[in-house]
């Protein structure tokens, strides 16, 4: 082999057969793996696929790449993602790529896409992204000028009243912890 020129494929097979006695690996198996080593090295380099034993390439790689780019941009922009949004975006990309008749973007497709890309349901916690810290003094002055028009007894805080109609979801799809925003409650 390249890293150790004194070892041949038969020696590698016998090493693994001694170490893992139930495997019974043949020299030809080592030869097949060695011939496609670049493919296996690229597959094994991603942390999301480290638990997968059999690598199957996706049927529509252009669609998968477009979805990966769009998903990473949506997560970076703080857009709440759901399975249904992934499904709809997959159908849009399929139409753009002229493969909509070959792909349904069903629940299984969404499940496998999430598995390949390490996406999981995450609760958005906290309100760290809600306050614009750089414009906070100006916003306070603006709020004071708006409230100066009203009597103090006519100003109410509707934050705790339960006006949660059409409120943004508190869960999204992502690969790690996501800071939440203050929820906007619409009447």
Image (cartoon, helix red, strand yellow):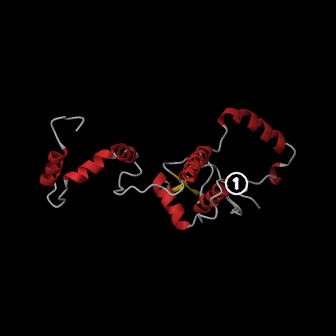
User: Looking at the picture, does residue 87 appear above or below residue 147?
Assistant: below
Residue 50 at x, y = what percent? 36, 51
Percent position (x, y) of residue 118?
46, 52
Left/right placement of residue 131 relative to residue 114 reads: right
Q: Is residue 15 visible?
A: yes
Residue 185, given in percent of the width and then of the height, sits at: 71, 57
Task: Quarter of the image for the C terminus: give it.
Answer: bottom right
* Front residue of 93 and 147: 93
Question: Mark 1: which secondary structure?
Answer: loop
Q: Which residue is mark 1?
A: 184
**In this view, 48 is above or below 85:** above
- Binning the other alpha carbons within 10 Å of mark 1 as few (below 14), some (14 to 19) or many (20 upward) gives few
Residue beneath the point at 60% across and 58% down: 86
Image quarter (top left, top right, bottom left or bottom right) of the N terminus: top left
Q: Nearer the viewer, residue 58 or 90?
A: 58
- Give the tally of numbered discs: 1
Percent x, y for residue 83? 58, 61
Can you see residue 169? Answer: no
Which image quadrant for residue 56?
A: bottom left
Q: Viewed as shown, does residue 96 lie left or right of 53?
A: right
Q: Nearer the viewer, residue 118 or 63?
A: 63
């Amino acid at each position: 082999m390249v890293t150790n020129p004194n070892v041949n494929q038969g020696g590698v097979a016998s090493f693994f057969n001694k170490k893992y006695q139930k495997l019974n690996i043949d020299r030809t198996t080592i030869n097949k793996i060695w011939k496609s080593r670049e493919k296996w090295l690229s597959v094994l380099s991603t942390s999301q696929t480290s638990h997968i034993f059999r690598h199957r390439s996706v049927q529509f790689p252009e669609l998968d790449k477009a979805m990966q780019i769009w998903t990473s941009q949506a997560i970076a922009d703080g857009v709440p993602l759901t399975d249904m949004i992934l499904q709809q975006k997959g159908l849009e990309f399929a139409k753009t790529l002229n493969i909509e008749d070959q792909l349904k973007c069903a629940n299984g497709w969404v499940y496998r896409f999430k598995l390949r890309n390490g996406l999981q349901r995450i609760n958005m916690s906290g309100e760290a992204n809600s306050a614009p810290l750089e414009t906070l003094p100006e916003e306070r002055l603006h709020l004071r000028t708006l409230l100066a028009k009203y009597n103090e007894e006519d100003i109410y805080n509707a934050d705790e009243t339960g006006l949660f109609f059409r409120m943004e979801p508190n869960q999204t799809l992502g690969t790690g912890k996501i800071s939440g925003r203050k929820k906007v409650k619409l009447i």
